[in-house]
Amino acid sequence: VDELIKAALHTDPVRIGIDEKELKDGNELATVSGLQQGYVVCPSEKRFLLLFTFLKKNRDKKVMVFFSSCNSVKYHHELLNYIDISVQCIHGKQKQQKRTCTFFSFCQAKSGILLCTDVAARGLDIPQVDWIVQYDPPDEPREYIHRVGRTARGVTGTGNALLILRPEELGFLRYLKHSKVVLNEYEFSWSKIANIQLQLEKLIEQNYYLNKSAKEAYKCYIRAYDSHSLKNIFDVNTLNLIAVAKSFGFSAPPFVDLPISNKPKVLVRSKLSGAGYRKKPKAFKQLHKR
């Protein structure tokens, strides 16, 4: 059990909902034995706080974090580097030369954080990845298996995988079970999660460029959610847009035109400051020292 579990989760993970013995007695599991994998149940408004805490405590590890859209990768790459969590990124909107350069840089690093879309889920052999974090759930169990396949490589390889689910998304575990994927549930104390929401909202409100990037990421997150193949589990109508907006650093949902199925256009407007990119709120200057 790695740093997140030591610091933020109870020491004994609780296995629920999936009978590992039953699966093993039937057919082989879909993932390798050296992979320790689990999930946490996290409401929308706490998702970034959980991710921030995890990455901050695992800076000395090699971590890959998967997102559902290129714009979400771009935004979190800009945000995390801005608040002194050094990360790299790979996504489909980058030129091939840039992706290749980042890939080799991450391969050669002993530790580091790589934010990515599913463009990095297949065909990339990256050595000694400690953690696969699925910040946004995959479109189907097959994609889950491809993502976690980036760690625990080889016959004796070991690694860890963490899937972050909203309470409304727990039905996805049934699909994973059907695909012979065994997960643990990790219970955790919110008192161990960094409480930086107010500082985050202030930063996004005051920083024009991060605000713009956050808005695009927010919009793409909802569109990706709406296009999910498992609509009975990932139902866009279950999203609390105020809570979702908070995970992108907004105090209220920004004004965006979202032509999504079975959902009226989002017409809530948040205040937008024209402050410059280089000004960093004092509260954030100390975050990396905590």
Image (cartoon, rainbow, N blue to C red):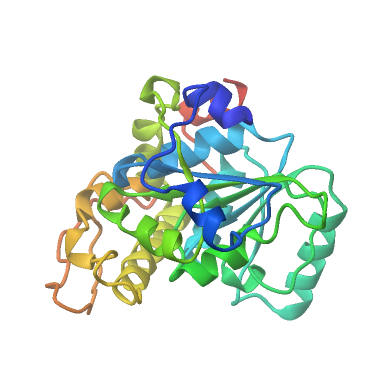
Residue 276 in sight: no
Instruction: Please indicate whether residue 157 sits to the left or right of residue 134 in the image.
Output: right
Across and down, in percent, residue 34 comes to: 71, 47
Closer to the camera in the image, 53 or 20:
20
Q: Residue 176 at x, y = what percent? A: 44, 61
Residue drawn at the location 30% of the way across and 57% of the way down: 171
> Residue extending furthest front?
25
Quadrant the C terminus occupies: top right
Q: Residue at 61%, 22% (x, y): give it.
A: 289
Q: Is residue 260 left or right of residue 192?
A: left
Taking the image as shown, residue 195 lies to the left or right of residue 51, namely: left
The single residue placed furthest to the right in the displayed view is: 108
Residue 263, percent from left and from top: 14, 72
Picture layout, residue 149 above or below residue 22? below
Placement of the N terminus among the 4 image quadrants? top right
Q: Position of residue 187 (x, y in %)?
A: 40, 30
Q: Nearer the viewer, residue 176 or 132?
A: 176
Image point (79%, 60%), residue name: 126
Residue lying at 49% horizontally and 41% vertically, measured from the top left: 51
- Is residue 64 visible in the rendered image? The answer is yes
Quadrant in the picture for residue 7 = top right
Camera-nearest residue between 138 and 83: 138
